[in-house]
Image (cartoon, rainbow, N blue to C red):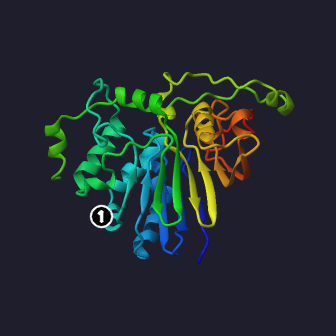
């Protein structure tokens, strides 16, 4: 049996990851995790989709962690392209009010999340691919023989905040489709020594209520026959810590993984020492644009 391959695509300031793995019977299982910015599609994602098309591969699971532009932009381009017509997506993990059938909420527009829902309602005839399932903490989902996904985020509070601010389509609007980003903080610590930064107490600059987009991120442990990875989306460490403890991971019995996809591009607001003490890791992956443009991630405090 071949080994798991994790491809972290050039996604500018966003996330776009492809995981090629195998179940216990040797069958391929392919995951697309987020799509980066709209420019990611042209720069790197399209080439990977060409490979899927040429090899007649399916995307067994498409995960949209949350609806910020640097995660959803490339997915929107994919769904609106011919590749989506030629590559089967067998299952989706996502949280959106009109797809998981939550019937209450205030009328606040989340434009790209709605666009994503409308594209799926238009193009996907099999609603069971996302079904009525809400993806949130403490769920352990069997994806295939020997492939397990343990959901760490969002928790109930994070999910409720997201759905309370969703714009809900009427039943008539949903039926009509059957036919047819978050603010980042600039780092200001370039003149402070690393050892001094490392001694700082963790203190996020936003509460869960203020940053519900990021804190509604789907974060998870992926367990495969030859690989275990921790993928943290953009979520806050407090939620992850609670979830890891619920799965009985402790400082004395840490989660052992091959790769940690660090949360929120290495922002100091999304990684804490308390979280790191629960993880025994071989490699960290930080998806970032290297501090270019308006973003300055990763923060030196995280490093």
Q: Left or right of 1: which side holds 192?
A: right
Q: Left or right of 16: which side holds 263?
A: right
Q: Residue at label 1?
A: 85
In this rendering, is residue 301 above or below 206? below
> Based on the displayed image, in which of its 4 quarters is residue 250 positioned?
top right
Q: Position of residue 266 (x, y in %)?
A: 65, 39
Q: Position of residue 59 (x, y in %)?
A: 42, 63
The residue depicted at 22 percent of the width and 51 percent of the height is 122
Dot 1: few (<14), some (14–19), or many (≥20) neighbours within 10 Å?
few
The residue depicted at 80 percent of the width and 31 percent of the height is 198
Q: Position of residue 256 (x, y in %)?
A: 70, 52
Q: What SS does tag 1 mark?
A: helix
The residue depicted at 25 percent of the width and 57 percent of the height is 126
Q: From the viewer's side, name the closer residue of 83 and 207.
A: 207
Residue 165: tell me if it is visible: no
In this rendering, is residue 83 above or below 141? below
> Based on the displayed image, in which of its 4 quarters is residue 111 positioned?
top left
Q: Quadrant of the C terminus?
A: top right
In this rendering, is residue 150 above or below 89? above
> Based on the displayed image, in which of its 4 quarters is residue 91 positioned?
bottom left
Residue 72: tell me if it is visible: yes
């Amino acid at each position: 049996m071949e080994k798991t391959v994790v491809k972290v695509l050039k996604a500018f300031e966003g996330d776009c990851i492809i995981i090629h793995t195998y179940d216990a019977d040797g069958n391929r299982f392919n995951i697309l995790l987020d799509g980066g910015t709209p420019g990611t599609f042209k720069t790197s994602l399209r080439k990977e989709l060409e490979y899927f098309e040429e090899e007649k591969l399916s995307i067994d699971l498409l995960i949209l962690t949350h609806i910020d532009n640097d995660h959803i932009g490339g997915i929107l381009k994919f769904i609106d392209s011919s590749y989506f017509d030629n590559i089967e997506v067998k299952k989706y993990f996502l949280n959106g009010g009109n797809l998981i059938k939550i019937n209450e909420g205030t009328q606040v527009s989340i434009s790209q999340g709605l666009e994503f829902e409308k594209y799926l309602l238009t193009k996907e005839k099999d609603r069971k691919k996302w079904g009525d399932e809400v993806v949130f903490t403490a769920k352990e989902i069997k994806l295939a023989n020997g492939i397990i996904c343990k959901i760490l985020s969002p928790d109930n509070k994070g999910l409720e905040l997201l759905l309370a601010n969703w714009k809900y389509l009427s039943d008539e609007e949903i039926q009509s489709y059957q036919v047819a980003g978050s603010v980042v903080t600039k780092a200001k610590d370039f003149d402070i020594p690393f050892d001094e930064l490392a001694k700082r107490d963790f203190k996020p600059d936003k509460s869960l209520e203020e940053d519900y987009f990021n804190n509604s991120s789907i974060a998870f442990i992926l367990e495969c026959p030859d690989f275990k990875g921790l993928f943290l989306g953009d979520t806050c460490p407090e939620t992850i810590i609670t979830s890891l403890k619920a799965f009985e991971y402790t400082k004395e019995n840490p989660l052992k993984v091959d790769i940690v996809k660090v949360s929120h591009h290495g922002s100091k607001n999304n990684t804490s020492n308390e979280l790191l003490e629960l993880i025994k890791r071989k490699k960290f992956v930080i998806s970032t644009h290297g501090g270019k443009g308006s973003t300055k991630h990763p923060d030196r405090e995280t490093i």
